[in-house]
Amino acid sequence: MKLDTSGLESSSSMPYGGTDELGAEFSTAPSFELPCSTNFDGFQKEAKQMVKPAKGTTTLAFIFKEGVMVAADSRASMGGYISSQSVKKIIEINPYMLGTMAGGAADCQFWHRNLGIKCRLHELANKRRISVTGASKLLANILYSYRGMGLSVGTMIAGWDETGPGLYYVDSEGGRLKGTRFSVGSGSPYAYGVLDNGYQYDMSIDKAAELARRSIYHATFRDGASGGVASVYYVGPDGWKKLSGDDVGELHYKYYPVVPNPVEQEMAEAPVA
Amino acid sequence: PAKLFLRSIKKRKKKARRRRRKMARYDRAITVFSPDGHLFQVEYALEAVRKGNAAVGVRGLDTIVLGVEKKSAAKLQDSRSVRKIVNLDDHIALACAGLKADARVLINKARIECQSHRLTVEDPVTVEYITRYIAGLQQKYTQSGGVRPFGLSTLIVGFDPYTGVPALYQTDPSGTFSAWKANATGRNSNSMREFLEKNYKDTSGQETVKLAIRALLEVVESGGKNIEVAVMTKEHGLRQLEEAEIDTIVAEIEAEKAAAEAAKKAPARET
């Protein structure tokens, strides 16, 4: 096989109008195009990181007076291709615990189901439900043991246990954070903007649901990797309950209904002389 | 060529047989069933327990007491290094009867498991959980090759970290466990258990301590230096009683006994 040495030939075809010294430099040494980067050793890794799935989704969860509110969009994207508009991103681990999906869909689905199995076994062995703390720790330990092997999981475990509402953020780097407000995914900055602005601990369930819905809607409006249906779940002392699942397109027209342009109307009603 | 082939097979078989015999020495299960369904090694282990020091545990409403018979210490021995009642965690304590060296191994494993549980679920163990773990360990050693069962029965006490309910469990070399209101193990455990069955009632605080010591005194020479007692409460955890304290309680008990006997004799004389 003949080697393709076209890269070695100087690509810049200097017009002979240029000064002779410059022209001489360019045409003597065989050269190949160098990447326009200062980091010759690491630019390949950076390229890989760029292409890596940036967890194209928007999920959020927050604790308030009445319990935990969990919401997510439903779009799955592969690069620029929308592969599905109806993905269930809120996974029901057991009747009183929910997990959200961000990152690799397969990874999230499998490990959440696995967590559900472990929680059930804990219940059977110890005759009491596992705490949200314990469940999130089990998942975090598993993900930590797979650290560096390419799992992509950014999940929130939300639930209600003996100590009240619980919310933890767990990711595939092995990190685990306890908190009251989280949003995960490529649309999370937009969701945080709306969520942090409207958040109050003393909200009613309806107000909190509306806040969660609007945050997801605004994220889907600006983030291309989020969209589909905004699902909102509520976790209370009796377990979780799905509150709503609205198409974000319809939500858009609900929040910003089309106002007919008054000027045109006037012209239409102009009396015919 | 056929002969060579057959010879090579013979060689391979001989090697395998030699290897199997070598491994067989370590693989043979020590605990095997007898024709009538007994596990003799386990029963012999129970014998070893029956020869061990007497130990008693009593569960009260808010107090749990463990008492162990203390063999008279040799003059040169530092009695503080021979602790028979130990902590597994802040809220769980254990006393045992039987082979003390086996106890050390089991206790170390249980202590590690208590911390491991705290690490993985961020919660302290319940008494039932750690009892199940210890019993599981004891059972494993009755069904493995080349090992013998642990020669000890344990009394595990503690408070549930959430509900605060006191609990007393007992395990034995076969790996079974169950919860008790009061139980005894070790030397003369039958007489102690009979006493407890006759005299048990719901008690709290000092009454529980007295009941435990009374049971122990049935089979042990009276005196503070022959008994080791530890009291566990929810607030203060495990507290080993001093010899002087035990002596005072023993004196109280003897006084009560004498008074009861005198009361019995007095009406008899009247009639």
Image (cartoon, grey):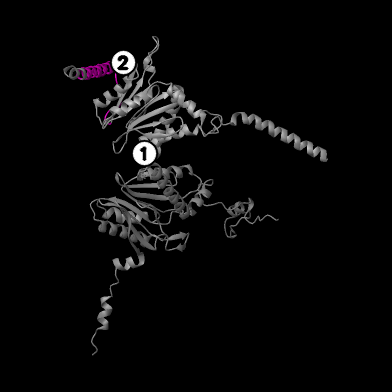
What SS does tag 2 mark? loop
Q: Is residue B39 left or right of residue A102?
A: right
Q: Is residue A127 above or below residue A72?
A: above
Q: Is residue B100 left or right of residue A26?
A: left
Label 2 Cα crowd, 10 Å radius (few <14 / some 14-19 / many 20+): some
- Would residue B104 be seen by someone viewing this image from the given angle? no
Which residue is nearer to you in this view: B190 or A264? B190
Q: Is residue A212 above or below residue B189?
A: below
Q: Which residue is mark 2?
A: B222
Which residue is nearer to you in this view: B14 or A201? B14
**Residue that sits furthest to the front in the current view:** B271
Q: Amino acid at mark 1?
A: Glu
Question: Counting residues from the N terminus, which is met first, the one under dot 2 or under dot 1?
Answer: 1
Instruction: Kindly report the distance in space between the C-alpha atoms of the residues bearing marks 2 and 1.
Output: 44 Å
> Which mark is on residue B122?
1
> Which mark is on residue B181?
none
Image quadrant in which you'd find residue B99:
top left
Q: Amino acid at mark 2?
A: Ser
Image quadrant in which you'd find residue B244:
top left
Could you tell me which chain the residue with mark 1 belongs to? B
Position of the N terminus of chain B, as image quadrant, is top right
Q: Is residue A226 magenta?
A: no
Which residue is nearer to you in this view: A144 or B236? B236
Q: Is residue B237 magenta?
A: yes
Which residue is nearer to you in this view: B168 or B116? B168
- Would residue A95 be seen by someone viewing this image from the given angle? yes
Rendered location of residue A267, percent (x, y): 26, 82
The part of the chain drawn in magenta is B234-263
